[in-house]
Amino acid sequence: MTPGNRRARLLRLAHEAARRRGHVLWPFRRQGRLGRAWGAACGLCGMAAWVTPHPLPNETEIAGEAVALPCQFNPTRRSTP
């Protein structure tokens, strides 16, 4: 799998996980000075999600409150995937 395909797949998975929890994510943007991670925040509650296509051994590929917790401000949210 090429790096671009890996990143695109992980971004799609993170977006879907956040959407299942009621979040409305802004587009993912490259984060940090080194640009190893991509991040997005929910436009309703501000919770964030991060994708690291090539994580270090102690990191995960997909992380953040938006992929783990339900959106506090979305009336149609679902607390379980």
Image (cartoon, rainbow, N blue to C red):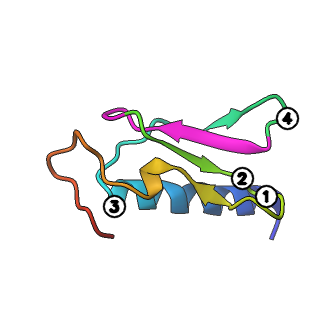
Q: Which mark is residue 20?
A: 3
Residue 34 has which mark?
A: 4
Mark earlier in primary sequence (1, 3):
3
**Residue 24's spot in the image, x, y percent?**
35, 42
* Label 4: how many Cα within 10 Å (few below 14, some 14–19, many 20+): few
Give how far apart the Cα atoms at labels 4 and 3 are.
30 Å
Look at the numbered disc 4 and give the secondary structure of its residue. loop
- In the picture of the structure, the residue carrying the numbered disc 1 is 55
The alpha-carbon separation of the residues under discs 1 and 4 comes to 13 Å
Residue at the disc numbered 2: 52
Which kind of residue does numbered mark 2 sit on?
Thr
Left or right: residue 66 versus residue 76 is right
Dot 3 crowding, Cα within 10 Å, few <14, some 14–19, many 20+: many
Residues 40 and 1: in front is 40
Mark 1 in CB contact with mark 4 (< 8 angstroms): no
Please report whichever mark, 1 or 4, sits nearer to the chain's N-terminal start. Answer: 4
Query: Which callout, 1 or 3, points to the residue nearer the camera?
Result: 1
Answer with mark 2 or mark 3, whichever residue precedes in sequence: 3
Label 1: few (<14), some (14–19) or many (≥20) C-alpha neighbours in 10 Å: few
Please provide the residue range marked out in magenta.
36-45
Sequence-wise first label, 4 or 3? 3
- What is the CA distance from the residue labelled 1 to the residue labelled 3? 24 Å
**Vertical placement of 65 versus 30: above or below?**
below
33 relative to 58, above or below = above
